[in-house]
Amino acid sequence: MRRALILAISLIALALTAAPGIAAAPTASTAPATNVTPQGATLNGVVTPRGHATTAYFQWGSTKTYGSRTPNQGVGEGTTAVPILANIDKLKSNTTYHFRVVATSSEGTTRSADRTFRTAKPTTTPNFSPNPATFGRPVTIFGTLVGSGSASANVTLLSRPFPFTAAFTQVGNTVVSNPDGSYSFTIGAIMATSQFRIAATTKPAITSAIATLTVNSQITFHTRTSVRKGHALRFAGSVAPAQDGVLVLIQKRDRAGVFHTVAHTELRKLRSTRSQYSRTVKPPRSGTYQVVVASAGGAVSPGISAAKSIRVLR
């Protein structure tokens, strides 16, 4: 009797072990979303097929009812964990989204626990052309809004000049962004190194991080383009804004393309808005020359003139 009972129990255990059932269904879990932007994210998860051919996908949406799903992904029929991911886009900015993994094999369907992420607020980065800018010359500030409400948003340019202690104030008129979120502003004459921000009526409204535009001294450079060997050339010009007493370097480019100082002088007064310089130099050989104004920085930074080719004749 006892031997028969033991045999019966063994047969039942063997049957339970061999029989398919819920215990062999795949396992699934989520991992944190990555690459989260104002309008997109990468969903991540892990699926273990547990020995049966398995497919998986993500359900996602702004609530736990989800409402959207990604395409099926095959994860094989192994017994080890397989990472899966899916990129989603066209999301609302600054919004919480839910997602989970759904894994299915012939042994059943498993749904992971719910996980959430929050999309970033709309954003933009102001760019400058040219960068750095030249004192007294035009500059364009441009960029693209990224996120909900980027198209046809009101965009305002804010600025404050060096030493950056004043409050930001509006520059020019507010513009309306293009359908792709792009915008631009032009300043007719930039007069100092300045910080800029963009304010836009995106959804939600944003004010960008600070972007700094460096403004270099404006330099004119006059000299003849040829001279006989052993003769002197006069290097002269003017600099704006006025920076009387600042060092001026006259430089020649070597064969490697590096400029080296061959002479120097100082700026002296020309008028209230501009300084001047003059220096006589005997060029040792033909080459390319430039003038550098070694400003200490601040409202304007060191400037470099346009380069000139000078031919030394025998």
Image: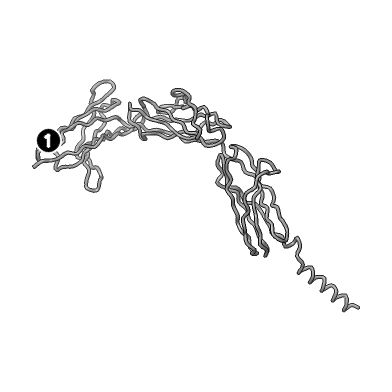
Q: Between residues 212 and 264, which one lies in front from this camera angle?
A: 212
Q: Amino acid at mark 1?
A: Ala
Q: Give x and y (percent) for residue 55.
A: 65, 57
Q: Secondary structure at mark 1?
A: loop
In the rendered structure, the answer to whether residue 137 lies left or right of residue 204 reads left
From this viewpoint, which residue is outermost toward the right?
Answer: 1
Kindly identify the residue that appears in the image at 53 percent across and 29 percent down.
Answer: 153
Q: Give x and y (percent) for residue 260.
A: 23, 42
Q: Between residues 52 and 118, which one lies in front from this camera angle?
A: 52
Q: Which residue is mark 1?
A: 232
- 280 in relation to 6, above or below: above
- 194 in relation to 311, above or below: above
User: How are the colours assigned in the image?
Assistant: one colour
**Screen quadrant of the C terminus:** top left
Quarter location, residue 250? top left
In the rendered structure, the answer to whether residue 207 lies left or right of residue 292 reads right
Task: Report the number of discs.
Answer: 1
Kindly identify the residue that appears in the image at 15 percent across and 33 percent down.
Answer: 224
Quarter location, residue 240? top left
- 216 in relation to 28, above or below: above
